């Protein structure tokens, strides 16, 4: 090894320290950068790497500098021109520094990295792997120089650095895989604590799932029941195993009578797994639809997974409330035939098909007015929230509350004070007469159409209907057809449309083209949501109604050019 040290040219030692320091720094910066997107993909390695490929998020700038360094160093060595070697040596630390600068250009994020304990563990293991790989490569260059004829130390150091830079995102996935056994043990311990605590405190557990509407239904039911008895619900969009586990461990107290659990489906068996964590006494299935179609590939697979909740509920002798309008009839017949038990149906169909019939829905500037029939009883519900699809969510929540023993008078009184559900057709009326409809979270085809209808209801005379949207995600093979359909619908309900990342939704843009070209609507395109919002705010005025339909995380919107 001593001979190897002395054999290396002086240029290697001039730049070795700064170059290694720069690349150690780059490794840390890139690790945090990639971890943000890995976290948004829920630490799913294949999905993260697919995102990397689709978005071409691999390094370019640093690699080009390093390739230039390789060419100059190799050329200098072959030609005996020391100035070429010196120039090439300078490019080594420059490669690391340019990589750092390109990474820092993406510091601002709509959804920043949340440094949870798990994220910290992944980053720490990744950093160790990246540093060891870098130092091992450096040691290999030192050892091989003079022993392997084709191995011209500094030049090959540059080439190995290119490989190292490109391999960094894979190291993040590897770090997660190495931690997986330990993570499973930690999760199992927390889960066991949650199961024991839930069994000991024994609240009435109400499970809610659906392709869409589950979060809104949870908030509506939570508001109704909290007027009747102490109620806890999983907050926001918490609907995963560890999210529910955390709420049980940290928030569930002996006085809680009702525990409402939103259950998210990420594949076959996922709802059943959540039901083993929090066995439901009663349940609501809001819908079976296109949301997350990309994960399931077919509506039949979606229905099969959603109705795992019914199976678990029937094991405890409970009742499952189903929004009949949200589930295709053939799938409903198939699943209720396969999983038999006590169902409570709500919907707009003929009364014999429903336990509670939704007779009429009126959308006004003040919210929704619903007319229900519960047997022979006529019920009117005034609810200050917006969107026609919310009618089914309200009816399902009210039906479940009634099934749990709450009288209609108390349900009606509670719904009159129902707060809007944040980011789900959440309407704000500004002092200067602008109605802002915030439907920024997890857009789906039905909710999108409902938002467009709200524009008509909330625009004042002389005002304009303005839409800002980047489109929807996770529609799989229905991506183009659904966006085309909604593009035609938007052209009928809007005067101004700001399209964010139009290249993602070409069928939507094409559907707007005819109306836009005729001058009936104004269509603007933007690469980033912030630019679209700034433009709209500069143009809106009194009487306008503005719909923010979806707001994609950086995973979908940010164009990575490293």
Image (spheres, rainbow, N blue to C red):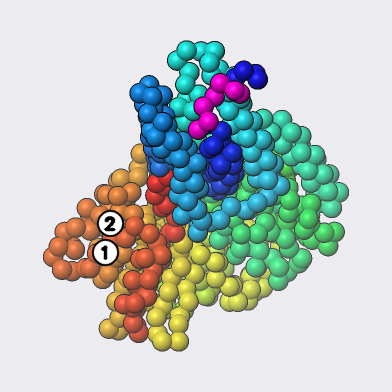
Q: Examine the residues drawn in magenta and state their main secondary structure.
A: helix
Residue 257: percent from the left, percent from the top? 78, 60
> Which residue is disc 2 drawn over?
487
User: Per the image, is 10 magenta?
Assistant: yes
Part of the protein shown in magenta: 5-11
Q: Is residue 314 in view?
A: no
Magenta-colored stretch includes residue 478: no
CA separation, marks 2 and 1? 14 Å
On the image, the x and y values in percent for residue 105 come to: 46, 54
**Which residue sits at x=43%, y=70%?**
437
Determine which quarter of the picture holds residue 234: bottom right
Q: Give the residue pinned by disc 1.
A: 524
Q: Is residue 407 above or below residue 504?
A: below
Work out whether residue 400 can be spotted: yes
Q: Nearer the viewer, mark 2 or mark 1?
A: 1
Whether pointer 2 and pointer 1 mark residues with C-beta atoms closer than 8 Å, the reply is no
Q: Which tag, 2 or 1, sits closer to the chain's start?
A: 2
- Total tally of numbered discs in the picture: 2
x, y percent for residue 48 = 50, 38
Which element is circle 2 on?
helix
Q: Residues within 10 Å of mark 1 (few under 14, many from 20)?
A: some
> Who's the residue at 74% across and 39% down the image?
187
Q: Residue at position x 67%, y 73% from top?
A: 410
Where's residue 16, x and y in %? Answer: 56, 35
Report helix, strand or loop for mark 1: strand
Q: Quadrant of the C terminus?
A: top left
Q: Is residue 300 left or right of residue 468?
A: right
At 56% from the left and 47% from the top, the residue drawn is: 29
């Amino acid at each position: 090894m001593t001979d190897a040290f002395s054999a290396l040219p002086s240029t290697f030692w001039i730049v070795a320290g700064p170059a290694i320091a720069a690349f150690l720094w780059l490794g840390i910066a890139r690790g945090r950068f990639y971890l943000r997107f890995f976290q948004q993909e829920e630490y799913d390695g294949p999905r993260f790497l697919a995102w990397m490929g689709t978005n071409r998020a691999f390094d370019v700038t640093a690699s080009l500098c390093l390739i230039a360094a390789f060419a100059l160093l190799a050329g200098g060595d072959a030609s005996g021109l020391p100035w070429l070697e010196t120039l090439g040596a300078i490019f080594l630390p420059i490669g690391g520094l340019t990589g750092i600068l390109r990474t820092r250009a993406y510091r601002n994020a709509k959804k920043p990295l949340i440094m949870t304990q798990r994220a910290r563990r992944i980053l720490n293991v990744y950093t160790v792997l990246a540093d060891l790989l870098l130092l091992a490569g450096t040691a290999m260059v030192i050892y091989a120089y003079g022993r392997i004829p084709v191995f011209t130390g500094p030049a090959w150091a540059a080439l190995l650095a290119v490989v190292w830079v490109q391999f960094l995102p894979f190291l993040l996935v590897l770090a997660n895989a190495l931690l997986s056994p330990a993570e499973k043990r930690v999760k199992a311990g927390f889960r066991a604590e949650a199961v024991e605590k839930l069994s000991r405190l024994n609240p009435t557990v109400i499970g809610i799932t659906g392709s869409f509407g589950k979060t809104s239904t949870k908030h509506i039911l939570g508001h109704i029941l909290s007027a009747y008895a102490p109620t806890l619900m999983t907050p926001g969009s918490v609907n995963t195993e560890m999210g529910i586990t955390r709420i049980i461990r940290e928030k569930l107290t002996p006085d809680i009578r009702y525990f409402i659990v939103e259950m998210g489906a990420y594949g076959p068996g996922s709802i059943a797994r959540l039901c083993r964590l929090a066995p439901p006494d009663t349940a609501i299935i809001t819908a079976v639809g296109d949301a997350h179609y990309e994960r399931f590939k077919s509506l039949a697979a979606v229905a099969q997974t959603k109705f795992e909740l019914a199976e678990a509920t029937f094991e405890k002798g409970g009742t499952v409330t189903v929004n009949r309008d949200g589930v295709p009839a053939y799938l409903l017949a198939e699943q209720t035939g396969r999983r038999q038990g006590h169902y409570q149906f709500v919907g707009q169909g003929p009364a014999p098909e429903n336990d509670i019939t939704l007779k009429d829905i009126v959308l006004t500037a003040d919210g929704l007015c619903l007319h229900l029939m519960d047997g022979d009883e006529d019920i009117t519900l005034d609810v200050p929230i917006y969107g026609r699809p919310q009618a089914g969510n309200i009816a399902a929540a009210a039906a479940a509350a009634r099934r749990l023993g709450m009288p209609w008078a108390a349900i009606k009184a509670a719904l009159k004070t129902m707060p809007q559900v944040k980011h789900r057709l959440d309407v704000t009326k500004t002092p200067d007469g602008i109605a802002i409809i915030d439907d920024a979270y997890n857009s789906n085809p039905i909710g999108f159409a409902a938002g467009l209808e709200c524009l008509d209801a909330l625009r004042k005379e002389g005002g304009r209907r303005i839409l800002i949207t980047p489109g929807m995600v996770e529609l799989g093979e229905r991506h183009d057809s659904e966006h085309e359909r909604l593009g035609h619908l938007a052209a009928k309900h809007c005067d101004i449309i700001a399209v964010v990342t139009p290249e993602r939704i070409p069928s939507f843009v094409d559907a707007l083209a005819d109306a836009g070209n005729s001058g009936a609507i104004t269509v603007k395109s933007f690469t980033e949501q912030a630019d679209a919002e700034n433009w709209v705010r500069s143009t809106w005025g009194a009487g306008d109604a503005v719909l923010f339909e979806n707001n994609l995380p950086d995973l979908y919107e940010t164009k990575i050019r490293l």
